[in-house]
Image (cartoon, rainbow, N blue to C red):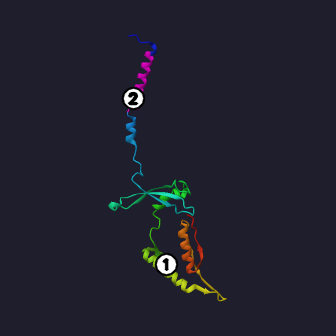
């Protein structure tokens, strides 16, 4: 059998290419790549939609947590990112919003009510019931002492000028409306609320 020069060059080039692929480690590369890929860290996480608490823009965030509720394991937040379906930010976050995972796990974060007794310089942890009752009691005492029912001319004004109220900027319009109605019904004039969502 006679081999032409062209056939010899073709067979030699094919043999060289096949041996080079094997020598460079490309044989079985797909299996090696698949074995080296780590599982997606959010695959088992629970996704929760929320609003960023930092400012009045109220960007949408996706909060991912891990924890098995059926085994009573405490959930822990592992990742926070912008919500691409949110109409305000379309998945983007500012530097503060992007760093909110550090805020969530900060050792300095206040997680429960604290109370400083008169004459001391130390705060102590108290229950939510204690905090709410104390706030209500102090508000009632101040309102009873400083409420103005009528002005000098005898016109009914129902004012409470010694206390002010500041509402959160991440409230919905409905929550802002209810806050406004509550605060105004007490007679407070010093009031600021930024319902932006």
Element marked by disc 2: helix
The percent position of residue 29, horizontal first and vertical second, equals 40, 35
Other residues around mark 2 within 10 Å, as few (<14) / some (14–19) / many (≥20)? few
Q: Considering only vertical position in the picture, is 81 above or below 7?
A: below
Nearer-N-terminus badge (2/1): 2
Q: Is residue 118 visible?
A: no
Q: Quadrant of residue 27?
A: top left
**Residue 9 belongs to the span the image colors magenta:** yes
Label 2: which residue?
22
Q: Quadrant of residue 36?
A: top left
Q: Which residues are magenta?
A: 7-27
**Residue 100 belongs to the span the image colors magenta:** no
Q: Magenta part mainly helix, strand or loop?
A: helix
Label 1: which residue?
135
Measure how far apart labels 2 and 1 are at the Cα level. Answer: 76 Å
Q: Is residue 132 visible?
A: yes
39 sits left or right of 103 in the view:
left
Other residues around mark 1 within 10 Å, as few (<14) / some (14–19) / many (≥20)? few
Element marked by disc 1: helix
């Amino acid at each position: 059998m006679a081999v032409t020069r062209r056939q010899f060059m073709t067979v030699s080039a094919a043999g060289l290419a096949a041996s080079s692929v094997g020598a460079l480690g490309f044989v079985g590369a797909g299996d090696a790549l698949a074995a080296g890929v780590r599982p997606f860290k959010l695959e088992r996480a629970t996704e929760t939609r929320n609003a960023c608490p930092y400012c009045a823009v109220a960007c949408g965030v996706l909060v991912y947590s891990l924890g098995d509720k059926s085994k009573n394991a405490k959930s822990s937040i592992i990742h926070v990112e912008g919500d691409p379906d949110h109409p305000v930010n379309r998945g983007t976050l500012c530097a503060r919003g992007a760093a909110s995972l550090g805020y969530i796990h900060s050792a300095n974060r206040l997680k429960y009510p604290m109370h400083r007794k008169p004459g001391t310089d130390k705060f102590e942890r108290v229950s939510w019931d204690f905090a709410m009752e104390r706030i209500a009691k102090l508000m009632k005492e101040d309102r009873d002492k400083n409420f103005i029912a009528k002005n000098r001319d005898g016109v009914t004004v129902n004012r409470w000028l010694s206390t002010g109220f500041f509402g959160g900027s991440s409230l919905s319009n409905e929550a802002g409306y209810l806050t406004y109605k509550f605060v105004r019904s007490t007679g407070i004039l010093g009031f600021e609320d930024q319902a932006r969502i």
